[in-house]
Image (spheres, grey):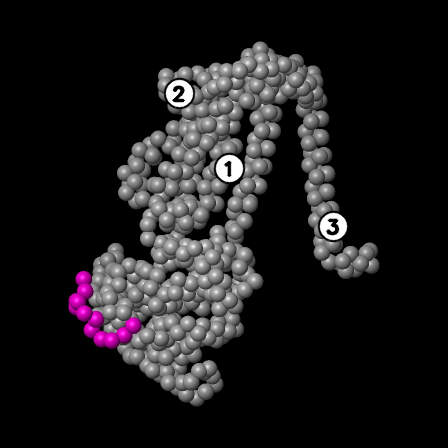
Amino acid sequence: MARMSQQPTDGKIVVDGIDKRFRSESGVVEALRDVNFAVTEGEFVCIIGASGAGKTTLFRIIAGLEAATEGTIWLDGEPTEGPGTDRGMVFQEYGLFPWRTVLKNVTFGLEQRALDKQARLERAHEMIDLVGLDGFEDSYPKELSGGMKQRVGIARALAVDPEILLMDEPFGSVDAQTKGRLHEELLDIWAETSKTVLFVTHDVDEAVTLADRVVVLTGSPGSVHEVVDIDLDRPRSRTDDAFADYEQQLRDAIE
Amino acid sequence: MSIDTTTESESGLFADEELLESGRRQRLLRGTIGTAVFLVIWQVSATPVPTYLLPTPLEVAQAFVVELTAPTTFILPLLGTEVTLTRMIVGLINSLYHYIPGLFVGGAAGIAFGIALGWSQLLDDAITPVQRVLRPIPPLAWIAFAIVWLGVNHQGAAFIVGIGAFWINFYNAYAGVKSVPESTKEVAASLGVESDLTMIRKVIVPKASPEIMTGIRTSIGQSWMIVVAAELFGAPGVGFQIINAAQNLALDVSVAYMFVISIVFLISDGIFQRVESRVLVWRE
């Protein structure tokens, strides 16, 4: 399956020559062609692109939820296969377990490990604190707002201490105001945990707000059109000229 | 009037509760009137007719009390000890002796098969043709096997009840497991769930539990229908009492036993409803 037995370049995660073809009723559909890029440790990278450019497909391949037709995803120099706790996932539709309370959602991943209950609870409370949900431990997902649900999603993904946090349009279902607050919080969490973050979005503004670098996917089949370094100090202000310039640059790149 | 409303709304929650309470009282009143009208129409139309065609509510009530208090001896199945109980209680115990095992064994098997076939595409493909052919067969049609294998007794009746409970629970559990979205399984996999057993136990069953609970609740009710039908062929119990009394033209006794089934159903359904709402407190 792997074209090379060695990781081609340095990086925490290396996306190496990924092709994806689906068989459909109308024949073979090519979703991705020769996608290559690398993410260094502790980096915050956004993947951006118009709908149909294969963002979600690429996310699912990196996450191990789908197999690539060609190519390899390398993590710490090892080829990945299938999903694993080394890649924590956060989804747009939260994917919370509705039958579990906030606390039990967060402990879910920890229950799959040989950890005593005390350690599990300690870790879970720490994560719930981190996302600012203390006091809601015993609430069920149905009692939470969209923003709170996604905080639970993040806490749950971080609880198992993954190498990488993979986020697929995580704030796509929350209102603009909540989104802004969640951006700040996510950057705080990122700073505090020094995780490597790979964040899929179609929102240019969101990408410039968050990312160290932005990978722009274009075309059909999708491939990497450009990688843009966002060289701005944080916290970033949307009203900055430089911010607007980056936005324009990304918008142009997508089209 | 307007002054009244303001003072009421000032007390906020209290006013709401009062409104709710008065609504409840009104509905209770309507229900009472409706029931009274029903009983009066029944009494009036049954009075000129002989009891063996249509008993009056009063005759039914009398028969109910007689059956409830008439002493009779009863040999406890399995134990063999003889005890003195009343006819109605004995009928009920007899029915429960095939209702409970049939419901539990058939229901548990149905849930287990439903989960297995809902989970495994291999089993689903292999068993579905047979399942499709067998499912439309009414439980009572299996009576021939019940009689030749087990006889006209508790086991035979339990077998019939079990078949009914099996299909209801099978289908609900199967549909529940099938409806678990792929994304839920993917989240669990990303959080370290590797074995099928863990996935089923920690994700599939809880997610499908509303459907599974619906199956259990439906089968609790449906199994009583089957109990009565199964007793048609002579197994002892409440259903047998209905038929036996009817054959003796004691329709007042028949109707009294019909009410026994109704009462037992209402009690068991009420209890289960409480269990269900506690188990599914998380449900949206």
Element carrying mark 3 = helix
Q: Chain of mark 1?
A: B
Which residue type carries mark 2?
A: Ala
Q: Earlier in the sequence, mark 2 or mark 1?
A: 2
Circle 2 is placed at which residue position?
Answer: B146
- Residue B10, position in %: x, y? 77, 60
Identify the residue at horizontal 22%, vertical 62% (top origin).
Answer: A69
Which residue type carries mark 3?
A: Glu
Element carrying mark 1 = helix
Identify the residue at horizontal 38%, vertical 47% (top origin).
Answer: B200
Mark 2 is surrounded, within 10 Å at the Cα level, by few (under 14), some (14 to 19) or many (20 or more) other residues, namely many
Q: What whole-number distance in Å separates the C-alpha atoms at marks 2 and 3? A: 56 Å
Which residue type carries mark 1?
A: Arg
Q: Earlier in the sequence, mark 2 or mark 3?
A: 3
In the displayed structure, does residue A145 sit left or right of residue A187?
Answer: right
Q: Residue furthest left?
A: A4
- Residue B109, position in %: x, y? 40, 34
Foreground of the two, A33 or A230: A230
Q: Chain of mark 2?
A: B
**Which residue range is magenta in the image?**
A1-12
Circle 3 is placed at which residue position?
Answer: B18
Main secondary structure found in the magenta portion: loop
Q: Residue B136 colored magenta?
A: no
Identify the residue at horizontal 45%, vertical 17% (top origin).
Answer: B153
Circle 1 is placed at which residue position?
Answer: B217
Foreground of the two, B18 or B85: B85
Element carrying mark 2 = helix
Residue A41, by quadrant, is: bottom left
Residue A15 visible in the snapshot: no
Relative to B91, residue A191 above or below: below
Q: What whole-number distance in Å separates the C-alpha atoms at marks 3 and 1? A: 33 Å
Q: Residue A4 colored magenta?
A: yes
